Image (cartoon, rainbow, N blue to C red):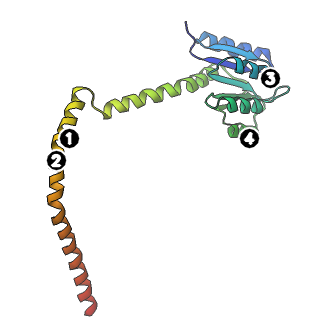
């Protein structure tokens, strides 16, 4: 069975990494863990990961710096910051780096599942909705061919109608604006 997505979990508490692994592996995700930023960056460089979860406070590099380095190498990879020390300043710093989400510990398994589902499924839904819109707006096969033939055959008549109508429209506009000017002029004299 092929994994739905590869997830990298970075947390200096091994129990947290094991919890993510247990929750996400049951749902079909491939999970790898790292205990610090340096180990995580080595794993990220060696393998492709679809989503990264990182703790905020860790020895060495903090979660913001890890997210910043990951986003510099792979800007399309969503990074989620998970912390027990959530402050508005931390959230602003995470947003400035471009993280996909900012979660507060303790996390329930349902929260982890909801976030990973939202992050990994969103592009697929957008692609499918774009395909559906394209199908609705553009006829396919025989319908498209008949539409194109009809437009091709009608185009000379449409052009001729514009050619014939243009002088009358132009003269009508000249007459209208001339009449407007004369009425203003006669109103100004009175």
Q: Pick whichever of labels 4 and 1 is earlier in the sequence.
A: 4
Nearest to N terminus: mark 2 or mark 3? 3
Q: Nearer the viewer, mark 4 or mark 3?
A: 3
Q: Is residue 170 above or below residue 28?
A: below
As drawn, the residue found furthest toward the right would be: 59
Vertical arrangement, residue 126 with respect to residue 110, above or below: below
At which x and y percent is residue 174?
21, 73
Q: Position of residue 164 (x, y in %)?
A: 14, 59
Give the mark, 4 or 3, whose residue is nearer the N terminus. 3
- Element under label 3? helix
Q: CA distance from mark 2 to mark 3?
A: 69 Å
Rounded to the nearest angstrom, the CA distance separating label 2 from label 1 is 9 Å
Q: Pick the residue in front: 5 or 140.
A: 140
Q: Which residue is mark 4?
A: 88
Relative placement, left or right, of 96 versus 125 is right
Q: In the structure shown, which secondary structural element does the residue marked by tag 1 occupy?
A: helix
Disc 3 marks which residue?
Answer: 38
Mark 1 to mark 3 CA distance (whole Å): 63 Å
Name the quadrant containing residue 72.
top right
Vertical arrangement, residue 51 with respect to residue 161, above or below: above
The numbered disc on residue 156 is 2
Q: What is the crowding at mark 3: few (fewer than 14 residues within 10 Å), some, or many (at least 20)?
A: some
Q: Nearer the viewer, mark 2 or mark 4?
A: 2
Q: Secondary structure at mark 2?
A: helix
- Image coordinates of residue 8 in percent, x first then y, are 69, 19
Residue 151, which numbered label?
1
Q: Quadrant of residue 39?
A: top right
Q: Residue drawn at (24%, 31%), measured in percent from left and top?
A: 144
The location of residue 27, given as percent across then percent down, is: 58, 12
Q: Are marks 2 and 4 in contact (CB under 8 Å)?
A: no
Q: What kind of element bears circle 4? A: helix
């Amino acid at each position: 069975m092929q994994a739905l997505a590869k997830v990298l979990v970075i947390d200096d508490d091994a129990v947290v990494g094991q919890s993510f692994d247990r929750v996400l592996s049951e749902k079909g995700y491939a999970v790898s863990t790292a205990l610090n930023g340096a180990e995580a960056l080595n794993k990220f460089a060696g393998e492709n990961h679809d989503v990264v979860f990182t703790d905020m406070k860790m020895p060495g590099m903090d979660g913001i710096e890890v997210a910043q380095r990951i986003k510099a190498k792979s800007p399309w990879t969503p990074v989620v910051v998970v912390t027990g020390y959530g402050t508005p300043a931390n959230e602003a710093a995470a947003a400035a780096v471009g993280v996909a989400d900012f979660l507060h510990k303790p996390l329930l398994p349902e929260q982890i599942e909801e976030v990973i589902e939202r992050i990994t499924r969103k592009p697929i839904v957008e692609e499918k909705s774009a395909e559906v819109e394209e199908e609705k707006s553009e006829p396919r096969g025989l319908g498209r061919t008949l539409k194109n033939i009809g437009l091709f055959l009608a185009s000379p008549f449409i052009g001729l109608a514009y050619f014939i109508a243009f002088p009358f429209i132009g003269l009508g506009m000249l007459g209208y604006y001339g009449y407007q000017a004369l009425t203003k002029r006669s109103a100004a004299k009175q």
